[in-house]
Structure formats: C-alpha cells, structure tokens
C-alpha cells in the first residue's frame, strides 16, 4: 500500500517535467526514510540532472538506509550526466522501487542489476502501466529512432472536422482548446497538411506562457504553401524551426521559403505525396521524439495508411454540422470492409468542459507496416 502511495507521488513529480525534457523521458523520484519523505525530485529539463540526483540533492537529511521510489529504472551509463546508479549506491540507500524498466533493449534491466549487485533491494513494476504511460514518446523514439505520432482532431458528434464551407473555428469549447495548447507544449513538433494551412491560415504555435514552442511541419508536396501565410511570415522570428516537407526540387521556389526562414526537407514521393515514413526517419535523426499531427483529413488518412500514427486524440463536441461534403477526420479512400478497420486500444473517455476527449493507441497488424 505504501509503495503505491509513494510511487503515485513520484508520478506526479515526473509530470512537472512535461514539455521540457524531450527527447528525454519524464521521470520522478521520492526518497523515504522511516516512513517520512526526505527528498523529492524530477527530471526538470533536457540535459539537466536526472530525477534520482535531484531527489538526493533535495534530501533534508542523510539518505543512508532510506528507500527510493523512481518511475523509471535508474540509468547506469555516462550520458549528459553521470550514472544515477552510482549516486544511489554512494548515498547508502538500501531499497529501490522502480515503476518500469528502461525501454531501451540495450539498457533494460542493467541499472536494476547493478543496484542488486551492490546489495540494494530492488523491486520493479509498481504502478507499471502508469509509469509506462509517462514515457510512451521516449519508448517509441528510443526503440525505433522515429517520433511518436499523436493524431489529434476536433469533431462534431456527426464526425465532421469542418463545415461544408470548410470552416472549423471553433468546434470545441474553451477548455478543450486550452488543453490542446497544453498538448502542443508537450510535443516536440506539430504537423499539418498544406490544405489546412491554405484554408485556416493557422500559426500552429503554443500560446501558453513559459511553454516550449513546437517545431512546425507542413506536408506540402509541390510547395503550394502561400508565402504570405502566417506560418511562413512568422518563420524567421519563431523560436523553433518551421519546416516544409516536400517532393519539389524547384530551386526558385525553395529559395523563397529559405529566405523567409523556413527549412526544407525533401522526400521521395509516395502515392503522389510526401513520403511520411521517410520524413519520420529524417525528423527522428533531428532529435524530434514526438509529433502532434493536426490533420486535416487527407494527411490523417495517409499517416494511418503508412503506419506512422501511434495514438489518436479525438475531441468530440456535442454539435452536428451535417453536410455530405463536410470533411471527416480521416478521409482518403477508406477501408472497403469493417473487418479492415484500423483498430484502436486502451481507450480513455474524458470529459473536458462541454466536450469529450477520446484517446486511444493504434494497433497495427504487422502487414500494415510498410
Ligand atoms: N477540426 C480539426 O481538428 C481540423 C484539424 C485540421 C484541419 N481541419 C480542416 O481540414 C480541412 C483540410 O483538410 P484536407 O483533407 O482538405 O487537407 P489536409 O490534410 O490539411 O492537406 C492535404 C494536402 O496535404 C498535402 N500532402 C502532402 N503530403 C501528403 C501525404 N503524405 N498525404 C496526404 N496529403 C499530403 C497534399 O497536397 P499536395 O500533394 O499538393 O502537397 C494534400 O492535398 C480544412 O477545412 C481544415 O479546417 C480541421
């Protein structure tokens, strides 16, 4: 019972690093001695001290003989900081409770084994599901080198993301829209299709104070993004990169976007558009661990079809737009039979003001991965 309680505290601490640790994971740690919490810490920002070292630094008394509760297995290698296992061993801690093992197959279990070899009692798997949820983007990135992709859209109860006149502002209420800003802060990048940019002229920034701005990516096969769009116009002063992913090799067009401060990523063509698989590889190499895919309909379909989507967040508003020409969240040709549906798992249904958020993980049968 106590283990669960302290691990819950460690999880809440870990969440404080949300949006600041990418591509590192969010991690929290609590140190307990004789039933009293003596130190708390979390991984606050990329390159900064790990949660375990912060918790040890914050101890108000010696940690000798204490227990540590940590959401992720302590690291045992030299990275930007020395191994946490070393700090734990030197501190005299006698028991370490771990939420989940390191998802990196080359590291998994090694930190726990080093602690055990040094006569520290180790227990793993306490609130494992919750601790795994904390590191889902990190787990995808570290095991594949590609970003975790969350497809996010807002739709009416009749499944429309815009009216037949292509108007989409606004579908959900203020609370849901605020939550989306928080999500933008958590992700390293936002990606949209060129039609959404032409239609809505969005900025795709995070409008929260003291938040990190995501890299902005437009999928634009033939470089149709208007040079006077807000996204291009703001590129040179924006705090993160603005990327156009394209198949175009038109030097004149490319130079115009470069002059405005945009970055160009060229991919091969897949089904007449930007090759999303290839794009994910390039973005992963750039260190982008997570992408919030904000559609629209055509890009969402391609992303699912090419197997790059890991999770889906559907905000559902209690409204009806109607209209057989009004777009739905996922367009394209669609599947021919119900049995061919993309399957979703681990679904959560959360009220957000007057709206609802339905969040799921995508389950790909192996053959859909190309
Ligand atoms: N409610 C919401 O949450 C929400 C969110 C976003 C958008 N929207 C609405 O959605 C509408 C736009 O959706 P849309 O379906 O027309 O367009 P879209 O998905 O925004 O953009 C599609 C375009 O992106 C380009 N593209 C580049 N690479 C692609 C790839 N691999 N796969 C697919 N397309 C690729 C294609 O043009 P090229 O081949 O010429 O490059 C394609 O025509 C707007 O009305 C907007 O308001 C609503």
Image (tube, rainbow, N blue to C red):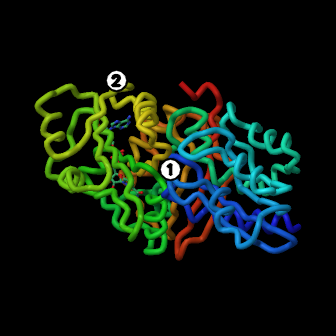
Please say if the residues under marks 2 and 1 sit with CB atoms less than 8 Å apart: no
Tell me the quarter of the picture where residue 211 sits.
bottom left
Q: Could you say which disc has been placed on residue 320 in the image?
A: none
Provide residue 86's location: percent of width, then percent of height: 71, 46
Q: Nearer the viewer, mark 2 or mark 1?
A: 1
For disc 1, the neighbor class at 10 Å (few under 14, some 14 to 19, many from 20) is some
* Real-space Cα separation, disc 2 to disc 1, in angstroms: 34 Å
Q: Secondary structure at mark 1?
A: loop
Residue 328 located left or right of residue 359: left
Q: Is mark 2 within 8 Å of ligand 1?
A: no
The spot of residue 160 in percent (x, y) is 43, 57
Q: Is residue 120 above or below residue 175?
A: above
The one nearer the camera, 263 or 192, is 263
The image quadrant in which ligand 1 is located: top left
Residue 78 x %, y % = 60, 39
User: Who's the residue at 53% across and 75% down the image?
Assistant: 354
Please provide percent x and percent y for residue 278.
Answer: 42, 28
Residue to which mark 1 is pinned: 47
- Figure label count: 2
- Label placed on residue 268: 2
Q: Is residue 25 left or right of residue 327?
A: right
- Quadrant of the snapshot with the N terminus: bottom right
Observer-nearest residue: 80 or 296? Answer: 80
């Amino acid at each position: 019972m106590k283990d669960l309680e302290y691990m819950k505290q460690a999880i809440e601490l870990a969440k404080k690093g949300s949006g600041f640790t990418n591509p590192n994971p969010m991690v929290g740690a609590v140190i307990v001695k004789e039933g009293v919490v003596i130190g708390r810490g979390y991984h606050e920002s990329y390159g900064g001290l790990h949660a375990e070292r912060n918790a040890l630094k914050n101890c108000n008394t010696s940690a000798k003989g204490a227990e540590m509760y940590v959401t992720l297995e302590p690291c045992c290698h030299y990275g930007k900081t020395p191994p946490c296992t070393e700090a734990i061993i030197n501190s005299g801690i006698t028991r370490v409770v771990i939420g989940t093992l390191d998802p990196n197959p080359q590291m998994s279990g090694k930190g726990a084994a080093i602690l055990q070899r040094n006569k520290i009692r180790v227990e793993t798997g306490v609130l494992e599901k919750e601790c795994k949820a904390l590191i889902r983007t990190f787990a995808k990135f570290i095991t594949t080198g590609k970003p975790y992709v969350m497809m996010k859209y807002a739709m009416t109860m009749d499944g429309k993301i815009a009216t037949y006149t292509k108007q989409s502002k606004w579908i959900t209420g203020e609370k849901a829209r605020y939550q989306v800003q928080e999500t933008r802060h958590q992700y390293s990048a936002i990606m949209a299709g060129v039609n959404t940019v032409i239609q809505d002229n969005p900025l795709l920034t995070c409008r929260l104070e003291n938040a990190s701005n995501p890299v902005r990516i437009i999928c634009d096969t033939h470089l149709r993004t208007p040079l006077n769009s807000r996204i291009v116009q703001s590129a040179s002063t924006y705090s993160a990169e603005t990327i156009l992913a394209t198949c175009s090799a038109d030097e004149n067009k490319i130079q115009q976007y470069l002059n405005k401060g945009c970055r160009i990523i060229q991919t091969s063509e897949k089904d007449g558009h930007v090759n999303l698989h290839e794009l994910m590889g390039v973005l992963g190499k750039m260190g982008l661990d997570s992408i919030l895919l904000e559609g629209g309909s055509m890009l969402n379909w391609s992303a699912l079809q090419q197997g790059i989507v890991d999770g889906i967040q559907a905000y559902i508003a209690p409204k009806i737009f109607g209209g057989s020409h009004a777009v739905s969240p996922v367009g394209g040709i669609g599947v021919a039979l119900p049995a061919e549906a993309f399957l979703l798992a681990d679904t959560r249904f959360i009220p957000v003001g007057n709206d609802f958020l339905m969040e799921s993980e995508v389950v790909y049968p192996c053959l859909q991965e190309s």
